[in-house]
Amino acid sequence: MLGFGRQRATVVVTTAPIRMNNDQRHFFYRKLHSLLGVLPLGGFIAEHFVSNAFILGGQKSYESAVGWLLNMPKPLLWTLEILTIAAPLLFHGVYGLIIARQAKNNTGNYSYARNRNFMLQRLTSFYLLVFIIYHVWSTRFTGHFTTNYTPDRIDQATGLIQSQQSIYYFMLEKLSGNWALGAVYFLGVASAAFHFGNGMWTFCIAWGITVGKKAQDNARVVFSGIGLALFALGTATVWHLVSTPNPFKV
Amino acid sequence: MANEPIKIRIKRQPGPGVASSWVDFEMPYRASMNVISCLMEIQRNPVDASGKPVDPVSWDCSCLEEVCGSCTMVINGRVRQSCSALVDNIRKERPGEPISLEPMTKFPVVRDLCVDRSRMFESLKKVKAWIPIDGTHDLGPGPRMNEVDRAESYKLSECMTCGCCVESCPNYNEDSKFIGPAAISQVVLFNSHPTGAMNAGERLDAIMGEGGITDCGNAQNCVNVCPKSIPLTTSIAKASRATSVRMITNLFDR
Amino acid sequence: MAEPRVAVIGGGLAGLMAAIRIAEKGGKVLLFSVVPVKRSHSVCAQGGINGAVNTKGEGDSVLQHFDDTVYGGDFLGDQPPIKAMTANAPRIIYLLDRMGVMFNRTPEGLLDFRRFGGTLYNRTAFAGATTGQQLLYALDEQVRRHEADGKVEKFENWEYLSSVIDDEGVARGIVAQNLSTMEIKAFACDATIIATGGPGRIFGKSTNSMICTGFAAASLYKQGAKYANGEFIQIHPTAIPGEDKLRLMSESARGEGGRVWVPKSSSDTRSPRQIPEAERWYFLEEKYPKYGNLVPRDIASREIHRVCYKLKLGIGGGAKVYLDLTHKPREVLNKKLGGILEIYEKFVGVDPREEPMQIFPAVHYSMGGLWVGYETKADGEMDMTHPKTHMTSIPGVYAAGEVDHLYHGANRLGANSLLSCIFSGDVAGPASVAYAKGLAKGADSVDKSIFDREVKRMQTEVDGIAARTGGENPFKIVDELGYMMLSECTIERYNAGLKTTRAKLDDLQARADRAIAGDSGKVANQSLRFAHQLPYLVQLAKVMVDGALARNESRGAHYKPDFEKRDDENWMATTLAQFDAKANGPSLSYVPVDARFIKPRPRTYGAPGN
Ligand SMILES: Cc1cc2nc3c(=O)[nH]c(=O)nc-3n(C[C@H](O)[C@H](O)[C@H](O)COP(=O)(O)OP(=O)(O)OC[C@H]3O[C@@H](n4cnc5c(N)ncnc54)[C@H](O)[C@@H]3O)c2cc1C
Ligand code: SF4
Ligand code: SF4
Ligand code: FES
């Protein structure tokens, strides 16, 4: 490629804009990492927190909020899951680890809030990586999510699902009374909310959206607000699951 | 405590690549002393705190008024200029403890507090931090500029390559190729000059690779430690915007 | 000869400008500097650079600038070079503007100019209050560009020790020392430009940077170069007294309206803002109604000195007066003087926008320096391209910047130095290339043994010091040197004091010659380096004192109360000092001043009764 690239540089460029040299590739991957963090991942996190919070309204509220997703034709759901969640997450997570490894944190001597956040962004990423693997494995690949969720198992008289086939009871069974796992989830929720809020704020600088100090300060207020809101929703969700007794418990 | 003798601990290293060790010094207090005058005192009387003769300490300084950028070192754990570090102020940071002086950690140590900052000057070469004039022959006045833009650029042009920003930056270290905030800010300075703007693309390309703008993680330590209060994070955001746009236009323009 | 090689010693404004010009002329530059060139002393210059661009509709002209400079220099300056410099000043300012210097602008987007001492015109272009820094960076950037193109090779952290002079007395290269590894090495080159700045360190504390030792000039002087007008040392009226340095408070503070005053009674203990107008004495404004606080530096310094020492009216009876800017709006001060006010605030801990500053005169600049010649054309103007213009008395060695003697006579006007430094580099660079191109044989083809000989001479000196034991600490000796020079060879000079100082200098020389390094370090041995320099500094001090002792008149910065008047009949002459090995000091001679354009007239600055 190098050999003929010199002579026919224009041809190479016009016909293959995607062909990049090392530097361009580096820049592109960093940008992609940053972009994926917002779309789709940031979007997904926000959606996930909000729809899960319907749990606070009980089984019916929750299951009608997430039902549409689960009722989607499987091939479509899988494609969506892979394209908008799994693949971006994998790239964001793995490439992010590489980035995080390059930093030499120094909050001891430079204990500015921003620097602490910089370090936290990296710390939370480590936790999230482990947590998400566990979370996906234990919910998506084992147990409930692997069996079909079909509405005809719903008891028409009470409107409640009768068995552990219910996603609501599936989660309840996992977490109800399980304070240890609750703590693990709480940390996951807190990490995700922080990583999201702080990540959005950095994104705005990294893409040159907020340039001046004022703009950056304002963005901090906005994303701290959103981050806190997500944190509150997530915490409430986890609290609900941990503190609600599981009626099916034998 | 005001007139107590000054106690200083210095991290000493006799040459490049050899082990370092801490040595204590003590000297009488005089009003309005700074770290440099303490080091000068050691030059005049090179003995350690126990009175044992030692080699005098090597360090860099020149202007003594915080414009040349020579005298950067890590004082009480924080990087800054030693000429403007007044003893009265820094003694308050760690009451009862000696003032600690260390060489910067992001550059190779030459001896004691002297380090080799050539990497920063190489970065300036890399980003083509200059206005490409045709020559020094008489071509009349330069381009007009409005005073508001001028004042903004002036702020950036005060960078004295002291290295405080990169010393504090978690992403700038011997394992990373990160070019650092000072050079990025120079890109913004030259790209906003009417003549410099003619080569804006070249400078952006120089920071659109490995070690370039994307390697900043927005810890924003840099802007907090810069002795010249240069709005580095604004420069970084401006350069980010310009490079993002360039990435996208590059996709469509060719 | 293929490509002329020129060693430029020093990367301040003068050295960098020379380097750019040589690169443009097709020469190869070896650029030496003891610090990365971006850290050269020129960064300290605050106030601005002069050029009669006349953008304020005041009718300023280059001839007016010429006249102000000659008059300000008390008619000791040779006039053709001064005329050439002032005529080229607008071009130089425009050039800097094109290089991207962030000069302050007018609302119309044009360069703004402010007033400085010794003139009635707004003639000083400025970039905030860090003009020197901004100019140096612009030149540094251009040099970096040439460096990236391979036309300039930098040797930063290398110190020039001496020139390699062949048996015909022609310079063929230099010997320099790497300040990290301490290696001493010769570099062959066809021409050398010394641009190493001023000698402030000889006075202990001054407004100069620590690297302004005068060592390079002293070394060349000891090798036979003539040193001119050494006795003319500028004392700046307004500096901030300090423990390690006397930091300058730029003349621009007065250019922007700063007023100098003392309380009418020295026992007045009120804080300055509490003292009513009627009880303040604005002594400069009173004595010089036309120029007010902007009289030239020598005059202002003498007045402050007189007020503090003769009249004992300094603040609280001490050696300080007020420099007051508190009547100016904060925003204006920040925009035009930000840099220097920050220095005051940082080092004194008082906000000068709220409280008048306390200042006192300090050693600032050397009008004298290595003697350089110039050629003139038929019309009497300086021939800027002649190979002999700006050459020292050693063929092949040029000098430019503060280290040359050419442009300021007996007193330099504020903001004329940045100009003379750049202009002299602008002239010396091409002249050195012209000289190199005209050489019958280049430095490559001379006998190698002369390089080895000079390296050996320097190595022996340095090794001798490293091996020496039992001598004194050089940093203590230089403190004494500074104290001596400050007390006897600055604002007021008396023959009796100068004579005893001169005798003491001989004694100090002997001690300096035996000073030890007291440092066993193999790398970056700063004490060894300074112990090597010190005897040279004492030699230069002797040049200054001898020159002052001999000159029985008062002219510009040289003021003898016992000889109050300027004496054009006997002393309108440039002092030339040449090293006399037998006397281990200078022998003096004089050449008349070239005053072909402007006839000398009394220098009164409109003071009544003068
Ligand atoms: C505080 C202050 C403020 C000033 N403000 C103004 C002002 O507003 N306007 C104005 O016109 N003038 C001003 N001046 C004067 C002016 O700044 C200087 O005269 C001028 O900068 C000198 O420039 P230079 O190029 O000759 O030398 P410098 O800038 O002093 O540079 C000397 C160079 O030589 C190198 N060097 C020295 N010795 C050696 C050696 N042995 N070997 C190798 N390299 C060596 C140094 O590393 C340096 O690069 C001011 C001076 C001071 C002290
Ligand atoms: S940006 Fe600030 S901290 Fe960084 S090198 Fe420049 S002056 Fe120093
Ligand atoms: S904002 Fe960027 S450049 Fe500044 S300290 Fe942080 S990572 Fe480094
Ligand atoms: S000595 Fe120049 S910045 Fe401190």
Image: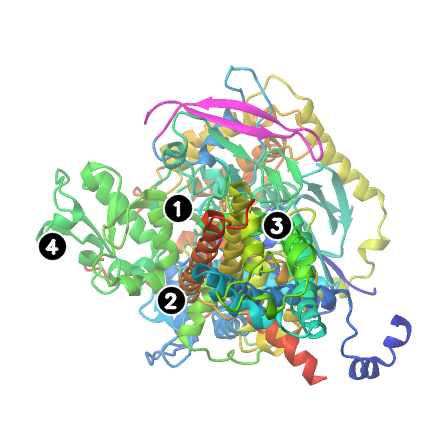
**Chain ID for label 4?**
C
Q: CA distance from mark 3 to mark 2?
A: 78 Å
**Quadrant of the drawing holding the C terminus of chain A:** top right
Residue C359 appearing in the image: yes
Q: CA distance from mark 1 to mark 2?
A: 27 Å
Where does label 1 land, which residue? Answer: C247
Residue at image position (69%, 26%) is: C464
Where does label 2 land, which residue? Answer: C68
Callout 1 and callout 4 share a chain: yes
Q: In the structure shown, which secondary structural element does the residue marked by tag 2 occupy?
A: helix
Contact (Cβ within 8 Å) of mark 3 with mark 2: no
Where does label 4 land, which residue? Answer: C277
Return the residue found at the far right.
A3
Callout 3 and callout 1 share a chain: no
Q: Which residues are magenta?
A: B1-30
Q: In the structure shown, which secondary structural element does the residue marked by tag 1 occupy?
A: strand
Residue B221 appearing in the image: no
On whether ligand 1 comes within 8 Å of the CB at mark 2, the answer is: no
Q: CA distance from mark 3 to mark 1?
A: 59 Å
Q: Nearer the viewer, mark 1 or mark 2?
A: 1
Q: Residue A165 location in percent, x, y?
A: 61, 59
**Chain ID for label 1?**
C
Amino acid residing under circle 3: Phe
Amino acid residing under circle 2: Asp
Note whether A117 is above or below A152 in the view shown: above
Q: In the structure shown, which secondary structural element does the residue marked by tag 3 occupy?
A: helix
* Left or right for C184, reference C239: right
Where does label 3 land, which residue? Answer: A131
Of the numbered discs 4 and 2, the one sitting upstream in the chain is 2
Q: Residue C401 location in percent, x, y?
A: 55, 57
